[in-house]
Amino acid sequence: MFVTTMTANDLLSEMQGLGFSEYEARAYVTLLERGQLTGYQLAKATGIPRPNIYPVLDRLQVRGVAARIDVKGGTRYVALPAEAMLDRIGREMSGRLERAKEALRGVQETPSSEVVWNVEGYEAVMNRALGLVERSRESILVGNWSNEARALSAAISAATVRGVRVTTLCIQGCPEECGGCRGEIYRYPVVPEQKGRWLVLSVDDEELLVAEMTPDGEARAAVTRLSVLVSLSGHYLRNAIAAAEIARSLGPGMMEMLDDGARSALQGAGLATGGAPWIARILKVVGRAS
């Protein structure tokens, strides 16, 4: 019945996601396909019981996505073109969202800073990360791989336009800029070589997302406002940047300049890879760049 790139059930499901009932979706799509129909013809074409078809058409008219036309020989109904219908619904949803935001501003929220939210699935994880970026007011501190850097780049660029201060640590340690990172950018491999990827995102020093992406496309994340976790993750990224920048400034011979206590502390800093300390990886990077 439906001429579309998706199945009839898929199309009906998408229409219901836009707020249509099943009958409303079936009636609208059939009118869109077949043009002007009488109520009787529409009921027959859709399988909607005749006693229900006119209330359905009334609701479509109230929503402004169908119109009644009085012609010689009776009354017919016609659908608003799909693009115009989607634009109309988009405007309605945007208006409702803004009104809901305004109404909720006056609602006292129950503090939930102690909660750690678990998020599963790559799309869900990245949508949550985008939401954090879009809510940012003052600062964004992010450690990521090039895949996630590109996925977040537009939202982070928009944040910089709002005056948000952005600091990015390329955990992947890309030798050249991939084009996805934004703000003040540092490129150092601060985590062990591994099959998966990490994303650490701290917004306004208030909210944190820590995620791991696996090679098979799966992803899981924890999101929290718990101050100790937000603070520790922020300090980890900032300290990693600071130590790597010191190593870059002093060069590969840095370790020879330090006393035993400083060398021992640096050997134990960061995350080891196969027994090799983090500082050894950074010094190799510095050596290649010098």
Image (cartoon, grey):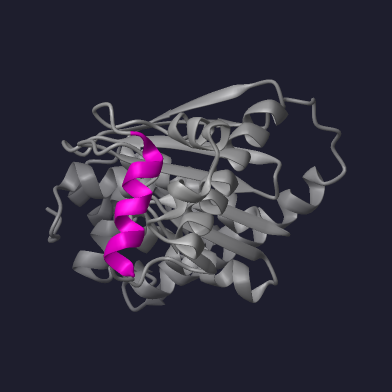
Residue 188 % position (x, y): 39, 54
Establish if 203 lies above or below 218.
below
Residue 38 visible in the displayed image: no
Q: Which residues are magenta?
A: 277-290
Residue 72 % position (x, y): 33, 78
How many circles with numbers are drawn on the protein? 0
Q: Nearer the viewer, residue 249 or 155?
A: 249
Residue 104 % position (x, y): 78, 43
x 52%, y 38%: residue: 209
Q: Nearer the viewer, residue 276 or 140?
A: 276
Residue 191 visible in the displayed image: yes
Is 286 one of the magenta-colored residues?
A: yes
x 24%, y 58%: residue: 30
Is 274 one of the magenta-colored residues?
A: no
x 61%, y 67%: residue: 159
Query: Picture quarter containing residue 223?
Result: top right
Q: Nearer the viewer, residue 4 or 258?
A: 258
Establish if 192 lies above or below 88.
above
| Prevalent SS, magenta region | helix
228 to the left or right of 126: right
214 to the left or right of 93: left
x 61%, y 42%: residue: 234
Quadrant for the C terminus in the image: bottom left
Residue 103 % position (x, y): 80, 47
Query: Picture quarter containing residue 179?
Result: bottom left
Q: Nearer the viewer, residue 164 or 117?
A: 164
